[in-house]
Image (cartoon, rainbow, N blue to C red):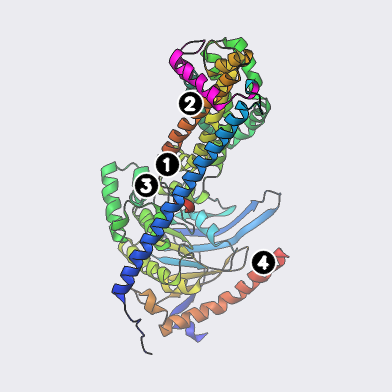
Amino acid sequence: MQSQTIAAEKLSPAAPPADAAIAIDDVTLRFVTPDGHMMTAIRDFTMTVARGEFACVVGPTGCGKSTTLNLVTGLLRPTTGNVRVMGNPVTDISRDIGFVFQADALFPWRSVIDNVAAGPLFRGTPKKEAYEKARDWIGRVGLSRFEKHYPHQLSGGMRKRAALAQTFINQPKILLMDEPFSALDMQTRTAMQDELLDLWSGLKSSVVFVTHDLEEAVALADKVYVLTAGPGTVKSVYRIDLPRPRVMSDIRYDPKFIEIAKVIWNDLREEVQLGQSRGLQASH
Amino acid sequence: MTAISPTDHAAARATSIVAAEAQARARLRKRHALVIGLRLAILVVFLGLWELCADYNIIDPFFFSSPSGIWEQIWSWITEGTSQGPLWLQIYVTLEETFLGFAIGAVGGIVAGIILGRNKLLADVFSIYIKIANSVPRVVLGSVFIIALGLGMASKVALAVVMVFFVVFANAFQGVREADRAMIANAQILGASPFQITRSVIIPSAMSWILASLHVSFGFALVGAVVGEFLGAKQGMGLLISTAQGAFNANGVFAAMIILAVMALVVEFIITRFENYVVKWRPAPFNEQGA
């Protein structure tokens, strides 16, 4: 495939270098279901994210995309293989990590500013300083007028902005995102993607962004991991050489973008079909 | 492509909106007045029929009393006091027992619910004993408490406590278990310690469950206190009822019942106020919006 040399370079998965921000090395994760069966969530999984790199993970439903994130947080432990974050093996939830959830994880009983200030307060920052910081971050995501509002008084997009501020206020070196924008409408999603790239370029954290939306992945990422249908493993890795800064509303009409998306889609399609046919079998 | 802009009648539209709003408000006021009027009418008809039936001996006022008889009884209790002392003292004694029992039972239930809800091992070990204790008919315990703790306040408070504890415990436990996983994970990653998670995620999310149980369990606390007095006491509304019952004084039984109902309603109102204050972050239920 000649087109790969243009912008989407296919990489061969290699053992991670020692200075990587996130290094998942040949990990297999099995767990025992409540009725006593052994399930393999992911197998022989290798992934490296360099410092300041934006990596997206795409794959069919149920292939273990979210599992990879939980390996990095330490909420799940690998059965074999090892996971390192900033060079250290994962033992506990690292203070360097920020996580944006798919569902609404804001605390509904706290106003926007109390939600955003939660991270610093949990970590022992004095109250005054925490609220000053919170006010600053609320301003950056454009919610200054809604400081005192409760989450249920905000729109879906505004809640996502608040969630981003809540995560970014801790200035995480590692940012994990689990389909964060999948519940938003198209226009809001595009705006949020721009917002995310803007915040990210200021912080230079290393990102793992899980999504089922290939175009979102290509538009955002430096590197796209395509997973196989479950139990998931890395099928192929692509480097996306689209220039930054990128503007989400324009990039989807860029011929180069379309070309890359097509190449990766060819790769992803059979896995999606496989995943779907399995899903149908399982439901019958 | 041609952009089509709607023709504009801004001024006319504005006046018609104002008129429509005024109409809607008038309709709401009228409906509100209708509801209140019908409620009053039902009360008047009910009390009137009762009084008439008693006057014409269709029902025997000796057994079923009559509104005027009940009112006379309440009035004489207020002005002359009851056989066991002033009415206010009886109300005060019963309320004190109820509140003490309610407070101890509720706090105990909440604390136990949160501890067991957060600790799987403790929950698995103790759940069987809680089930057993819960299946004992609690009013029977009243006799045990009277024997053990005497005729004073302690036995009534103890009965109110056991009435309240299990209800609040069950709800607090369930509330803790239902706390959103993503929210807990979020707090954990934001840097919260287990204690901080309990305080700022678990307890607030269990709060609506706990508050719901407080509504019900205040009624139970009152039942506990009154039944305790019934079984043996020196003061209180329960004793007043049991004395009236012993003297075949139907007026007295009904009068005490109405006083207890008013007490329960007043406290219920206060709890609702408190609840609205505590969970002001919650969206208003649909039927209350705009009211």
Characterize the magenta stretch by its predominant secondary structure: helix
Q: Which residue is mark 4?
A: A279
Q: Say the numbered circle drawn on residue A118.
A: 3
Q: Is residue B86 left or right of residue B138?
A: left
Compared with A168, A184 (above or below) is below
Co-location on one chain, circles 4 and 2: no
Residue B273 is situated, as x and y percent measured from the top left of the image, at 42, 38
User: What whole-number distance in Å separates the C-alpha atoms at marks 1 and 2?
Assistant: 19 Å
Q: Residue flagged by tag 2: what amino acid is it? A: Ala
Question: Which image quadrant for residue B42?
Answer: top right
Residue B132 is situated, as x and y percent measured from the top left of the image, at 68, 27
Q: Residue at x 55, y 50 (%)?
A: A77
**Secondary-structure class at tag 3:** helix
**Secondary-structure class at tag 2:** helix
Q: Which callout, 3 or 1, points to the residue nearer the camera?
A: 1
Q: Residue flagged by tag 4: what amino acid is it? A: Gly
Of residues B185 and B59, the one drawn nearer to the viewer in this rendering? B59
Q: Chain of mark 1?
A: B
Q: Residue flagged by tag 3: what amino acid is it? A: Ala
Residue found at the far bottom of this picture: B1
Of residues A226 and B135, the one drawn nearer to the viewer in this rendering? B135
The magenta region covers: B63-92
Co-location on one chain, circles 1 and 2: yes
User: What whole-number distance in Å separates the C-alpha atoms at marks 3 and 2?
Assistant: 31 Å
Q: Residue flagged by tag 1: what amino acid is it? A: Asn
